[in-house]
């Protein structure tokens, strides 16, 4: 019966794929029949009397500026004229670029005006206006500035990909000004972008790439001044031109952002609260028009949102998102080559766990910092007028020690867990025609531990490129890297990796082939992130995308791919998979996603055993998932996700999960997001331990249940003052069923007995409450309360309330902190003098 159900699911997915594909020419004009839309241009006008940024457009200087109008729809009817009239004017002086936009609307009372935190543009229920700027006019590098009718600012560097409005956690937070107002015939946005937020070539006469966007939220129309073809490249590849920018003499670009912070923290087992305070400085210096130095001295990241920690039963490291502002701002150039993971800087000391492995019977670890102390970090980045981007990153962390105490004598000793470490990265990135580029990167980690054989130095050199033809329908891209580890008394390690892909990557129908190889000795994890090496993969994918609405469908994407997997060394087959997916958005803005993945020959997993050369064989496997999302502009909306996974082995293994996440938009100032997710792995089999002599690798049969609740809310007082609340409870239990096995050299298992208890019950509880007041451009005060519990036990709880009582009995950490940072621009002091 289950096989019949599986066949039906696969048949349904195939029908969805091919039925949608047969509509290739239905209800839409063929690409060849579309009218040719030429690149637009607007002349920038220089002024000695800049406008007041007050959201009124009544300054006389605006009347001298050229008008950018006749916007064209990006969505829903790509290429059709916008239903709404929009006029944009541009001015500049030696200090900044000024943009004034009039968004006409026949029903100004119907304009959506929801408030939100800064950079909350995704899903914000408000009309928005956006400026894309590429001073080098290469369609790759630049900046994006967005403001909502309610005054919420968002900014970010450009990203690749066709979906301009997708969510991303990057936070740039440049210092710029904006003001908006609703008038009787629509709404107005005025924007001032100082040159301190931009980098541009030093030429007497310049032409910049530029585009303007408008989103009317109530009917989801997105339109742009210069036409953006959804079938080709990213939205940033379709800029118009801003011409006649002459004789810019920018002032000195120098700013300081000093901060002070104070903390009151009460941790479990401590007799009283601990008081600490910090002070430091961020500096930004414009070396010239093109290059900028960013530096942070004695940074403090204690107020960043808590990580969503989990019980990790896999052999792979958990990757956490970066939340520290300095490592999120202006780092797009350092993402080239995919060898830099910013969380490595100031991460857990490399010898953190080694302390516990080298204790005497009477010793205990009484102090062991889980994060390395960051001394300072700096980055220099920019681009020459020939399109050569140059980036240099450097950071230093302090020597870290753990304290070990002899419980009988009371004597203590210090153990070094991390030496003084320097992290360095250099990037060269050359822009080419047709939005192409080629990059060269190098990362280096140097540890001051010449006399300690437990530490080593590491270096990675790599390249990345993307070459597109003139039509931008065909491209070839790739990455390659060489890693080196330098040890004191043993032979150095060298490894290499490459990835190459190419095909038809634009248009409605797409086809791409990709090959990826990582040698068994390749490792860039000292400064990057890599789950595993020793892989050789080939992948072929085809997809068909629908961008023009037809019938009840607004847009759709359907894809089919095949992947063949081997070890790099020795060249042995490890598995293959077929992946079929369909993603449809309907005209009522409800989205539906369906995916199926099938591994017909199972998988030989060389990573689960945690011992080189050994593998565990899983049977054939089918994974399916479905996702439904309602219109998020409604007062009440929800996302629902379901998944089911079946493995054909004698142990009746399967997995299922579901999640529901409703959103309540109570008012324009107040919303509530809740999510509950339940995941169950039934009769899951995984690694538990091993012994060395003789070598025995033990696996166990277990049920793994995960229940995760998230509640996020807040009150927005204004676009610059808001309170946010986030609560998360994660509960995972690994319940072993007293069935254990030894791993055989052919990947099979043989039953055995083990006396130890491997059950584990884990809870992670976090409350983050933050009030933010942006009292001046670039300046803010933040008050944060954090409450956290991380508890693990070999006692399994099946009752939710019993588990909660046990979790709270383990003790919690409370932290209350206040931080004030103030933005100081050198121009302010010059004006006063």
Image (spheres, rainbow, N blue to C red):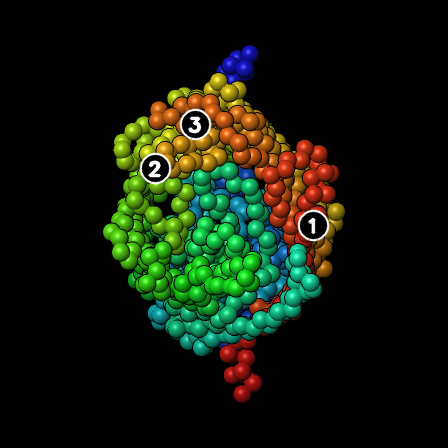
Q: Which of disc 1 and disc 3 is earlier in sequence?
A: 1
Q: Quadrant of residue 345?
A: bottom left
Q: Residues within 10 Å of mark 2 (few under 14, many from 20)?
A: few
Residue that appears at 68% across and 52% down: 811
Residue at disc 2, secondary structure: loop
Q: Quadrant of residue 562?
A: top left
x%, y% of residue 449? 35, 63
Query: Disc 1 versus disc 2: distance between alpha carbons?
Result: 47 Å
Left or right side of 533 for 761? right
Q: Which residue is mark 2?
A: 612
In front here: 111 or 376? Answer: 376
Q: Which of disc 2 and disc 1 is earlier in sequence?
A: 2
Q: Residue furthest front?
A: 409
Task: Kindly indicate whether the residue at mark 1 contacts the one at mark 3 (C-beta within 8 angstroms).
Answer: no
Q: Which residue is mark 3?
A: 742
x%, y% of residue 785? 68, 59
Q: Residues within 10 Å of mark 3 (few under 14, many from 20)?
A: many
x%, y% of residue 737? 57, 27
Q: Which residue is mark 1?
A: 713
Q: Is residue 740 above or below residue 89?
A: above
Residue that appears at 38% across and 37% down: 692
In front here: 281 or 188? Answer: 281
In front here: 159 or 306? Answer: 306
Residue 17 shows in the view: no
Q: Is residue 491 above or below residue 410?
A: above
Q: Quarter of the image for the C terminus: give it.
A: bottom right
Q: Quadrant of residue 75?
A: top right
Q: Residues within 10 Å of mark 1 (few under 14, many from 20)?
A: some
Q: Residue furthest bottom?
A: 833
Q: Of circles 1 and 2, which is in front?
A: 2
Residue at disc 1, secondary structure: strand
């Amino acid at each position: 019966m289950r096989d019949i159900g599986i066949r039906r699911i696969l048949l349904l997915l195939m029908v969805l794929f091919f039925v949608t594909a047969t509509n290739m020419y239905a209800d839409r004009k063929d690409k060849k029949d579309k009218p040719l839309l030429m690149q637009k241009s607007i002349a920038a006008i220089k002024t000695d009397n800049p406008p007041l940024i007050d959201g009124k457009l009544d300054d006389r200087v605006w009347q001298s500026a050229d008008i950018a109008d006749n916007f064209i729809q990006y969505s829903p009817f790509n290429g059709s004229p916008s239903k709404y009239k929009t006029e944009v004017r541009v001015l500049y002086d030696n200090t900044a670029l000024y943009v004034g936009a009039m968004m006409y609307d026949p029903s100004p009372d119907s304009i959506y005006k929801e408030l939100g935190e800064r950079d909350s543009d995704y899903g914000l229920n408000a009309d928005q206006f956006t400026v894309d700027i590429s001073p080098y006019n290469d369609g790759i590098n630049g900046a994006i500035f967005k403001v909502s009718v309610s005054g919420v600012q968002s900014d970010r560097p450009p990203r690749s990909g066709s979906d301009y409005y997708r969510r991303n956690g990057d936070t740039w937070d440049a210092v710029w000004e904006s003001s908006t107002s609703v008038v009787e015939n629509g709404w107005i946005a005025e924007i001032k972008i100082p040159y301190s937020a931009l980098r541009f070539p030093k030429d007497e006469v310049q032409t910049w790439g530029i585009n303007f966007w408008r989103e009317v939220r109530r009917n989801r129309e997105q339109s742009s001044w210069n036409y953006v073809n959804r079938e080709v490249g990213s939205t940033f590849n379709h800029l118009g031109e801003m011409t006649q920018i002459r004789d810019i003499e920018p002032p000195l670009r120098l700013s300081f952002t000093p901060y002070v912070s104070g903390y009151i923290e009460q941790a479990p087992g401590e007799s009283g609260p601990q008081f600490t305070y910090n002070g430091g400085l961020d500096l930004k210096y414009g070396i010239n028009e093109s290059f900028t130095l960013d530096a942070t001295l004695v940074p403090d990241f204690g107020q960043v949102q808590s990580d969503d920690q989990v019980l990790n039963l896999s052999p792979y490291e958990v990757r956490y998102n970066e939340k520290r502002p300095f490592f999120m701002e202006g780092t797009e150039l350092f993402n080239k080559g995919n060898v830099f993971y910013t969380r490595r800087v100031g991460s857990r000391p490399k010898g953190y766990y080694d302390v516990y492995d080298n204790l005497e019977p009477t010793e205990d670890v009484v102090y062991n910092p889980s994060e390395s102390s960051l001394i300072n970090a700096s980055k220099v980045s920019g681009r020459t007028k020939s399109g050569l981007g140059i980036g240099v990153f450097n950071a230093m962390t302090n020597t870290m020690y753990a304290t070990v105490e002899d419980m009988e004598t009371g004597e203590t000793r210090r153990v070094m867990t991390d030496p003084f470490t320097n992290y360095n990265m250099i990037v060269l990135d050359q822009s080419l025609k047709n939005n192409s580029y080629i990059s060269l990167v190098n990362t280096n980690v140097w540890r001051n531990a010449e006399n300690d054989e437990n530490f080593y130095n590491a270096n990675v050199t790599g390249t990345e490129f993307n070459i597109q033809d003139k039509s931008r329908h065909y491209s070839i891209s790739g990455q390659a890297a060489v890693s080196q580890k330098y040890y004191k008394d043993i032979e150095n390690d060298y490894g290499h990796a490459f990835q190459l892909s190419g095909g038809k990557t634009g248009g409605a129908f797409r086809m791409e082939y990709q090959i990826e190889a990582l040698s068994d000795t390749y490792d860039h994890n000292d400064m990057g992130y890599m789950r595993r090496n020793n892989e050789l993969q080939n992948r072929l994918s085809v997809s068909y995308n629908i961008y023009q609405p037809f019938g009840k469908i607004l847009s759709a994407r359907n894809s089919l791919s095949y992947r063949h997997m081997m070890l790099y060394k020795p060249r042995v087959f490890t598995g293959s998979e077929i992946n079929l997916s369909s993603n449809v958005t309907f005209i009522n803005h409800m989205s539906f996603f369906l995916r199926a993945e099938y591994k017909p020959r199972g998988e030989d997993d060389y990573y689960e055993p945690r011992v080189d050369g050994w593998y565990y064989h899983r049977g054939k496997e089918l994974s399916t998932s479905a996702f439904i999302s309602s219109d998020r502009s409604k007062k009440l909306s929800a996302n629902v996700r379901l998944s089911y996974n079946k493995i054909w082995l004698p142990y009746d293994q399967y997995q299922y999960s579901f999640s529901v996440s409703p959103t309540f938009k109570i008012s324009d100032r107040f919303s509530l997001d809740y999510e509950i997710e339940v995941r169950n792995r039934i009769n899951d089999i995984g690694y538990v331990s091993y012994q060395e002599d003789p070598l025995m690798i033990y696996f166990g049969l277990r049920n793994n249940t995960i229940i995760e609740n998230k509640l996020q809310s807040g009150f927005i007082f204004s676009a610059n003052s808001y309170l946010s609340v986030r609560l998360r409870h994660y509960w995972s239990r690994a319940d072993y069923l007293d069935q254990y096995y030894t791993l055989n050299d052919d990947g099979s298992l043989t039953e055995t007995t083990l006396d130890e208890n491997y059950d584990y019950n884990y809870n992670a509880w976090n409350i983050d409450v933050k009030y933010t007041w942006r009292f001046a451009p670039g300046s803010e005060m933040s008050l944060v309360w954090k409450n956290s519990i991380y508890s693990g036990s070999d006692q399994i709880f099946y009752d939710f309330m019993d588990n909660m009582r046990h979790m709270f009995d383990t003790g919690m950490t409370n932290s209350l902190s206040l931080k004030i940072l103030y933005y100081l621009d050198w121009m302010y002091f010059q004006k006063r003098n």
